[in-house]
Image (spheres, grey):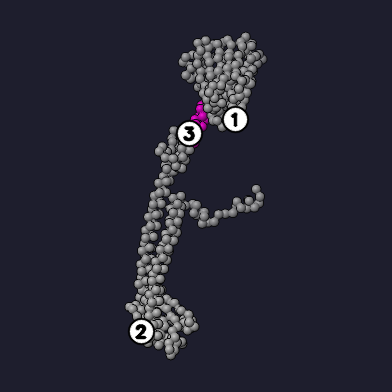
Amino acid sequence: MTPQEGAAETVPRPRGLRRWQRLPVVVRLVLSVATAMALVLGGATGLVYWRVEHALDEQLDADLATYFHQLRGDLLAGRKLGGPDGSAYQVLDAQGRILQASDLVRSQRLLTTADIASAARGATVHRDIGGLATLDPHTLRLRAQRVRLPDRTVIAVAALRRGHRDEALRELLAQLGIAAGLTLLAASYVGYRTVRAALDPVERYRRRAASLADGTSGLRLPVPDDRDDELTRLGHTLNEMLERLEAAAERERRFLADASHELRTPLSLLRAELDVALHQPRPAAELTATIRSVDTEVQRLIDLTNALLDLEQLGGTEHLTRSPVDLPELVASAVNPHRAAAAREGRTLHVDAVPSAVNVDAGWIRPAIGNLVDNALRHSRGDVRVTATIHEGNLRLTVTDEGPGFPAEFLPKAFDRFARAEASRTSPGSGLGLAFVAAVAASHGGAAHADNTGHGATVTLDIPC
């Protein structure tokens, strides 16, 4: 990271932004909706006001132009000056002195010095007297222009009252303000209810998830089945996460229970052997036998620990690394280490694997096959046959022996941890071999099952490949 990047990362955020981000999500969303709606309403109000004002001004200017032409015609014709209701006039000389005026503006100066000078040069002057907010009934709009009479030049000023126009605009502003305010309140309320309705599932998820802190198991978030929106998908994802967490916690509890159950016996035996060796003088031969017994128990502890750790690691599929593997080579590498032990007992290992490549994790499949072969050699008699075939996209591994088979009551729990048939309880083993095989199959998305053939036992693994 460059110094410039580090400096950019440490620049503090503006205080206003930090305060904004500390607000609850509902408040932020409602304020955002209200602000956006206020901008829209402000723009709409301004547009409506401008259009109405423009229409009223056009009409007032048209009336004023008509009145000015009438006033100019009367001046040129020498007729008596007058006008419609709400009108006023003045006739000024070039210096701005009032020569004639209507009663309404007889003493009021309508034009400034600059306006008089501009009109005297021939320009047309337009002015408004009074403002919209003054509430003055005598607000005027005037038009002034130079008029050449036969004997002199004067400035004619025609004016019309703007009271009706200003009152209409004030009423329009009031009505628009009320409508905009009510609309803003309604939009804010609807926005609040919408946001609350949208976030209610999140709050329910939070309350339900909070109960997990009490150690309650089996909890799932209340996700509706008839929807497919973002929050529903979030709920399903969280439920899947809860299932994985619960499965991980269950694996941890099982691991601890299994370890405490199985480690207690060998540790007690070790302690007893060592206590006897330490507190009673014993001949060298007995000490050697004790040490060998201790070594046997230590090896049993190592094997048991490795088996438990393997089972724990197989709790999820994230430890699998599938890759194409030659099937005959895979089976041979798992069976060959056991051929010497089989030969010592006068037994034969038969291997029948179809020439094919399978997409599996050989690091786990190989010891699973080895476990099955080892079990068959220890708990049966006669030859052992290992077959590997491909059937409908599945790898089927079968290990068959010629022994007495599994006891009928043992078959339903053959793949449970520490499950051992009564006849094999005095033989070496931890009761984790078949559990390991089942875990390997399950981690690959497959399954393992055991059965008796009438003249032996068979264990089969079906694994997608």
Q: Is residue 465 in view? A: yes
Q: Closer to the N terminus: mark 1 or mark 2?
A: 2
Q: Position of residue 234 (x, y in %)?
A: 47, 40
Tell me, yes or no, whether the highlighted magenta stretch contains residue 298. Answer: no
| Residue at the spot 47% in from the left edge and 84% down from the top edge | 120
- Which residue is labeled 2 in the image? 81
Which quadrant, please, contains the C terminus? top right
Circle 3: residue type: Glu
Q: Position of residue 34 (x, y in %)?
A: 43, 56
Quadrant hosting residue 283: top right
Q: Closer to the N terminus: mark 3 or mark 1?
A: 3
Q: Is residue 303 in view? A: no
* Residue 11 against residue 383 in the figure, above or below: below
* Residue 103 against residue 265 in the figure, above or below: below
Q: Residues within 10 Å of mark 1 (few under 14, many from 20)?
A: few
- Horizontally, residue 29 falls left or right of residue 337, namely left
Along the viewing direction, whichever of 306 and 450 lies nearer the viewer = 450
* Numbered disc 3: secondary structure: helix
Q: Position of residue 435 (x, y in %)?
A: 53, 22
Q: Magenta residues?
A: 240-259
Distance Cα–Cα, label 1 vs label 2:
107 Å
- Which residue is labeled 1 in the image? 321
* Residue 125 against residue 38 in the figure, above or below: below
- Which residue is labeled 3 in the image? 243
Circle 1: residue type: Thr
Nearest to viewer (mark 3 / mark 2): 2
| Residue at the spot 61% in from the left edge and 24% down from the top edge | 357
- Horizontally, residue 140 falls left or right of residue 14, namely left
Distance Cα–Cα, label 3 vs label 1:
23 Å
Nearest to viewer (mark 3 / mark 1): 1
Distance Cα–Cα, label 3 vs label 2:
97 Å
